[in-house]
Amino acid sequence: MKKTVVLAEKPSVARDIARVLNCQKKGNGFLEGDQYIVTWALGHLVTLADPESYDDKYKTWKLEDLPMVPKDLKLVVIKQTSKQFHAVKSQLLRSDVGDIVIATDAGREGQLVAQWILDKARVNKQTKRLWISSVTDKAIKEGFQRLRNGKEFDPLYHSAVARSEADWYVGLNATRALTCKFNAQLSCGRVQTPTLAIIAKREEEIRQFKAKPYYGIQAQTNEKIVLTWHERMSNDTKTFAKEKADEILSKVKNKQAKIIDVDKKAKKSFAPQLYDLTELQRDANKAFGYSAKETLQIMQKLYEQHKVLTYPRTDSRYLSSDIVDTLKERVKACGVGPYKQLAHKLLQKPIKGNSSFVNDSKVSDHHAIIPTEETVFLNKFTDKERKIYDLVVKRFLAVLYPAFEYEQTTIKADIAGEIFVAKGKRVLSSGWKEVYENRFDDEENNLDDVKDQLLPSVANGDALTISGVIQTKGETKPPTRFNEASLLSAMENPAKYMAGESKDLIRTIGETGGLGTVATRADIIEKLFNTFLIEKKGKEIFITSKGKQLLELVPEELKSPALTAEWEQKLELIAKGKLSKNVFINDMKNYAKSVVHEIKNSKEKFKHDNMTGTKCPECGKLMLEVNGKKGKMLVCQDRECGHRKNISKVTNARCPNCHKRLELRGQGEGQIFVCSCGHREKLSTFNERRKQNQNSKVSKKDVANYMKKQNKQEEPINTALADALAKLKLK
């Protein structure tokens, strides 16, 4: 009987599969059993060949040699991992191997990893596909019981190839053309450039914004009800006319309020939807400041190493109906530590699915991110892993809890012919908010702008005495700059961020989808940082001078979110077998030619405005000072040289004056901390101050133990600690 080769994407997953399949014999880059041979990639082992593989002239970047449009793109083995490629190839071509199970990540990129290896190794054996959303032993066993025909995934593979080849034709040609034409390191691409254009558009909106003052009126009654003025026709609570606000203020002063309507409604609020990758990246950035790439890396560990969460690269926020029967087991598995009581409450009744989170039509490749059935050991997580796990588990438990129920009361009053309104709420049932200890942001969940004032019992026709009237004032605020969380939102739904564009363009963008995919957006943002087209100041993202100039140099069409979103939609059609990959690639070749032609004939100029007097130690040319994501660095202006040197880095150390993060400059003993507020401090002085602070601090653990003893009304064992705590309390 012939054996089956199982090709995994990473060694850790291969070891898990090998254990389940009882493959214990170790070989060179594989594990073998009686029926199966498990081998692995190291991510990509094969990639598209560089331009110089097609013609030696491409070794040197020259404008006259562009565009580069080989008829077919070739595959090459990645040099750094060639040893593992040959180890995998030798197993695939064994005469005693009859078929192959592709067990790489269950997504577009995972399919590409495996199929490129098979294509480069020239393997034509029958393939089957392991398609699972978690790598627990149970999931692996069940997956092998329902292996799918490998041919089913050919369209997905063609979509992945189309994406990769499109980036080659458009990205490499445009980048080389810009770099050669303007003698600067300029990088652009079919997703990163429209993303940069969205950031630039927001920057321009902020620059052109002019604040307008607005006014409102608030009245307070003797019964402590705060009433807010509402414009009778528009129901708006503010006016931009100061004269009107003044007139209303004098009109209602010393007048009574007559209740004209009391409306009480029972309302429900349901838990936020389950996480897909983009939403998780957004929340992790808001809550912890993690970059999109960092969140994905943490998720990969929770998925592959700890096996406690399902497949991260998903764009669905729903579960498929076949998952419903597993919910009870998943609740049991994650019901540890701080989640124990929450899980226990759910397990008292049958756990059922409903349309708010179960919908087969809204799950394509993978369902939403949820816990697996694997037993959880929280003490094995790093602090970052713990935080991401906490987000996912709470969201999972929340959707299983009943709705948050409250009674909303709206009081309308007439004061001198003007309408005033007061709103309040009374909680009837905490529901899913119990998971978040009732601290979940109401504004995020659209609770109709309900204010938390407690309203006394009043009835229609009641007259209330006004104890005070004030005029409130505010100012319109400019659009906020993007952070990584909001930039992910813009990439997911660029139509929302195109105010001022034509309705036809906005409609086109809305119909064609987002920029990139859940799996690629993090890398796109990182690339924009790494090529110094954008930079961070605090949490906010700013476009650099280089980024602004790049957008003036690239063809207009390449900046359009509509065009790029349309391409992403076509890739989806290829994945569904509804569009030929060759038709799409021919379009990309023609587009690459037009881009190069336009750049060649450009009359624009590029100017370095960050040139320093420091010469590159490698080539002698003057270096550029740039703001990297982790600090300042010097970069050689010559692309072929590529020398870089860090000159400062942003640290987690805090300024003693304003508490902002400090920047560490210099090298060796001369290193110094610098803050934007003007504070400067030698590294040695800072370390000495931190050491003294640590010596004088009482640890959280000691405090917790002490408080525990106090609660039991026992004499503390550590009297020195008790004295220290008493002193702190007095302070």
Image (cartoon, rainbow, N blue to C red):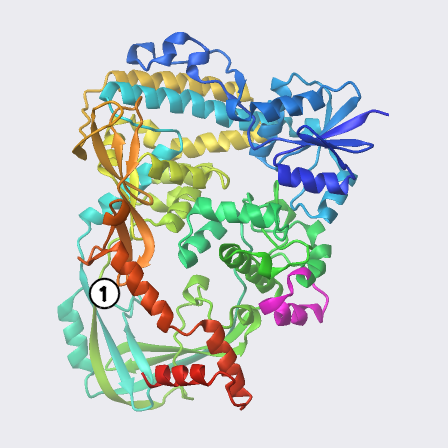
Q: Residue lying furthest right in this view?
A: 1
Q: Residue at point 30% right, 24% down?
A: 639
User: Does 557 appear in magenta?
Assistant: no
Q: Amino acid at mark 1?
A: Asn
Q: Is residue 90 above or below residue 189?
A: above
Measured from the top left, where is residue 328 in percent x and y?
A: 71, 61
- Front residue of this view, candidates 492 and 141: 141
Mark 1, Cα crowd under 10 Å, few <14 / some 14-19 / many 20+, is: few
Q: Residue at point 18% right, 47% down?
A: 208
Q: Residue lying furthest front in this view?
A: 669
Q: Is residue 388 above or below residue 294?
A: below
Q: Residue lying furthest top in this view?
A: 56
- Front residue of this view, candidates 561 and 216: 561
Q: Residue at point 19% right, 35% down?
A: 610
User: Does 339 appear in magenta?
Assistant: yes
Do we see residue 501 in this rendering? no
Do we see residue 59 in this rendering? yes
- Front residue of this view, candidates 672 and 284: 672
Report which quarter residue 118 is drawn in: top right
- Front residue of this view, candidates 683 and 353: 683
The residue tagged 1 is: 657
State which quarter of the image contains the N terminus. Answer: top right
Left or right: residue 375 compared with residue 505: right
Measured from the top left, where is residue 691 in percent x and y?
A: 34, 64
Number of on-image labels: 1
Q: Residue at point 66% right, 25% down?
A: 88
Measured from the top left, where is residue 270 in percent x and y?
A: 54, 64
Report which quarter residue 609 is drawn in: top left
State which quarter of the image contains the C terminus. Answer: bottom left
Q: Which residues are magenta?
A: 333-351
Q: Mainly helix, strand or loop, the magenta region?
A: helix
